[in-house]
Amino acid sequence: MSGGVPDPEAAAPEPGSGVPDPTSPLTATGNLRRRAGVSRAFEVVAIVAALVAVGVFCLVIFAVAQRGLSAISFHFLTSDPNLVDIGSGGIAPAIVGSVIIVAIATAIAMPLGVLIAVFLVEYAGPRSGRVIRMALDLMNGLPTVVVAFMVYGLIVLGTHEETGYAASVALAVIMLPLIARSSHQVLLLVPGSLREAADALGVSRWRTVVGVILPSALGGIVTATILAAARAAGESAPLIILDSLVIGEVVHVNPLHGLATMPLTVFTYLDTGTPAAVSQAWGTALVLMAMILASNVGARVFLARNRSRLGL
């Protein structure tokens, strides 16, 4: 060593001394090769699982389309059902009833879900935030039939009447955790610089939330709401328990009475068992599936555009 500079030759360990040489090239050990093999195996399993899921999805679409496409027509979508000759009627009351029930549920669940998300992001402490998030996760895991029976005891037993409004309340309970958790994640993506700029200008917290945070996250919130509404539209247990089992003969829009819905129509027609009724049930299922798929695809496209606009 001279002048405080280490000598590379003197620093190199002697062969056979048991000390690794830092200048030697890296070689894959048995442990590293084993980890790489396990990683590749898990990648293959994940790819196979994803392909199986896509395959099952495509199989369901193909099966429903194959059996229900023959029933689809303009008359089928726009006419009232014929309870005497089911094969000659349509499902217009069921389409209108489903839209009304899901719209009321969305009007109930969306404001509550957004307010919960705002509280979690802007006001909740660590402990209260954990409790609320856990409660939302538990609500999201509740079976829909349990939610239906809860609403049945709270509303139907008191009014002694099955109504579309009761079904909307049950669907709102189902939608609430989805909207709240998704909106919470979207609000977390809003840049913190926007909040800091509002604070620097002396803007109050609530005005910052209303005027800056929510408009920035509006696209994601709308997307979450659409996805939650699409999921609620396909639920059948709340409609069977809380809504009228009688298929509406004409279109009506009063949610304080029973409303015909597409899941309920599928259930009733399949229970009838006649070939014409079964064909109508498959056609109704195809219409419902197409509406849900269109909602999901539209929500994904809207979310992608919103993310690109925010630069996320």
Image (cartoon, helix red, strand yellow):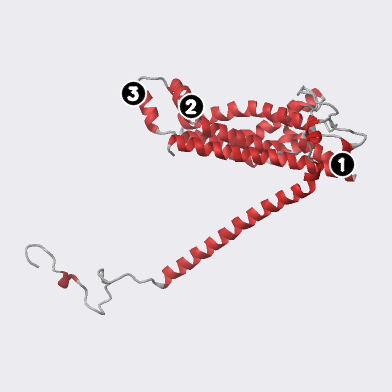
Alpha carbon distance from label 3 to label 1: 66 Å
Give residue 49's position: percent from left, percent from top. Answer: 60, 58
Q: Is residue 152 above or below residue 33?
A: above
Q: Which residue is mark 2?
A: 215
Q: Which residue is mark 3?
A: 200
Alpha carbon distance from label 2 to label 3: 19 Å
Alpha carbon distance from label 1 to label 2: 48 Å
Give residue 32's position: percent from left, percent from top. Answer: 42, 68
Q: Is residue 205 above or below residue 291?
A: above
The extreme right residue here reads 84
Nearer-N-terminus badge (2/3): 3
Q: Is residue 47 above or below residue 284?
A: below
Please rate how many residues cluster around mark 1, counting C-alpha atoms within 10 Å: few if below 14, some from 14 to 19, many from 20. many
**Residue in view at x 30 percent, y 71 percent:** 25
Determine which quarter of the picture holds residue 28: bottom left
Residue 154 shows up from this direction: no
> Which is in the foreground here, disc 2 or disc 3?
2
> Which is in the foreground here, disc 1 or disc 2?
1
Residue 117 is labelled as none
> Which is in the foreground here, disc 3 or disc 1?
1
The extreme bottom residue here reads 16
Tell me the SS state at disc 1: helix
Residue 277 is labelled as 1
Between 125 and 44, the residue placed more toward the observer is 44
